[in-house]
Amino acid sequence: MVLQILTFRTTGRRMFRMAPFHHHFELVGWAETTVIIRFWLLTAITCGLGVALFYGEWLAAVGA
């Protein structure tokens, strides 16, 4: 939302067509289920990356 406001104030154009963010994708033409599934996948990937970073740092600290 901050990016939307800053972009609008500086350029006079909106970055996204509508807020909340997922409505932007619906207006672009994505089906609601497509938006939901892709957000789930993005969440799963970032959670996996976070867990991998945590355990990588933990293993380095423990010395295993």
Image (cartoon, rainbow, N blue to C red):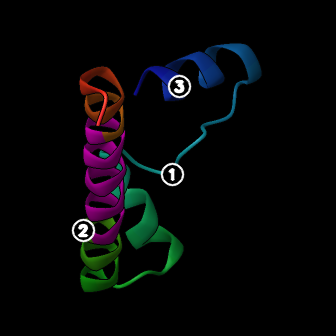
In front: label 1 or label 3: 3
Q: CA distance from mark 1 to mark 2?
A: 22 Å
Residue placed under numbered mark 1 in the picture: 17
Whether label 1 touches label 2, CB < 8 Å: no
**Position of residue 57 measured from the top left corner of the image (x, y, whole percent):** 34, 29
In front: label 1 or label 2: 2
**Position of residue 35 measured from the top left corner of the image (x, y, whole percent):** 33, 73
Q: CA distance from mark 2 to mark 3?
A: 23 Å
**In the rendered image, the vertical position of residue 14 relative to residue 45, given as above or below:** above
Q: Quadrant of the C terminus?
A: top left
Q: Residue at x 33, y 83 (%)?
A: 34
- Amino acid at pointer 1: Arg
Left or right relative to 6: residue 52:
left
Could you say which disc has been placed on residue 40 in the image?
2
**Label 1, residues with CA under 10 Å away: few <14, some 14-19, many ≥20:** some
Pointer 2 or 3: first along the chain: 3
Q: Residue at x 37, y 50 (%)?
A: 49
- Amino acid at pointer 2: Trp
Q: Secondary structure at mark 2?
A: helix
- Which residue appears farthest toward the right when viewing the image? 11
Left or right relative to 35: residue 17:
right
- Among the 4 quarters of the image, the one containing residue 10: top right
Residue placed under numbered mark 3 in the picture: 3
Pointer 1 or 3: first along the chain: 3
What segment carries the magenta color? 41-55
Q: Secondary structure at mark 3?
A: helix
In front: 63, or 45? 63
Q: Residue at x 53, y 25 (%)?
A: 3
Q: Is residue 35 magenta?
A: no
**Label 3, residues with CA under 10 Å away: few <14, some 14-19, many ≥20:** few
